[in-house]
Amino acid sequence: MVRAVKIVFSNQKHALGISISRRAEISHATEALHLPAPRPVIVWIGGAGSMAPRYEEPVSKVARTVAQIAQEKNAMIVDGATDGGVMAVLGQVYSQGDYTSPLIVVVVSSITPLLPMQ
């Protein structure tokens, strides 16, 4: 079953979340997100653990560049939904910017309750 949920963050920005129970529902989930296809996709992966402070600014610069490219090319970015490492940096860049290109985060169902869903 595909279920849509609204996620509201502390800065009042929001996101649409889609929950699926079976792999076969992925195509229905993308329809529920209203993502036009075909569309370029950027996959943002890397360490989800702690990052040495000396890498935070260089990684932030790369994340801002990737977000800007996604914006210019009407691409969507897919990453994990961890609050650490490079994925957290990209989330922070998006939360501080005015990006309209989709940032799709993949969340394992066992951690979904940790998101601020309504």
Image (spheres, rainbow, N blue to C red):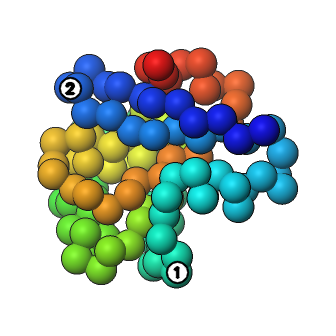
Q: Are the two marked residues, 2 and 1, in contact with CB atoms closer than 8 angstroms?
A: no
Say if residue 54 shows up in the picture. Answer: no
Image quadrant containing the N terminus: top right
Near-viewer residue (48 or 2): 2
Residue 44 image offset from top left, x and y in percent: 46, 61
Left or right: where does residue 27 sit relative to residue 5? right
- Image coords of residue 77 (percent x, y): 43, 62
Image-quadrant location for residue 16 = top left
Q: Residues within 10 Å of mark 2 (few under 14, many from 20)?
A: few
Q: Identify the residue shown where x is 70% and y is 31%.
A: 109
Q: Is residue 73 visible?
A: yes
Q: Residue at x 58, y 51 (%)?
A: 32
Could you tell me how far apart the alpha carbons at marks 2 and 1 are, in whole angstroms? 31 Å
Please state which of residues 101 and 6 is positioned toward the viewer in this rendering.
6
Q: Is residue 54 left or right of residue 111?
A: left
Which residue is tagged 2?
11
Disc 1 marks which residue? 38
Horizontal and vertical percent position of residue 99: 22, 56
Crowd class of label 1 (few under 14; some 14 to 19; many from 20; radius 10 Å): few
- State the residue in front, 53 or 1: 1
* Picture layout, residue 8 above or below residue 100: above
| SS category of the residue bearing label 1 | loop
Tag 1: amino acid? Pro
Q: Residue at x 51, y 47 (%)?
A: 105
Nearer the observer, disc 2 or disc 1? Answer: 1
Query: Sequence-wise, which precedes: disc 2 or disc 1?
Result: 2
Asked where in the image residue 91 lies, by quadrant, the reply is top left
Q: Which mark is residue 110?
A: none
Q: Type of residue at label 2?
A: Asn
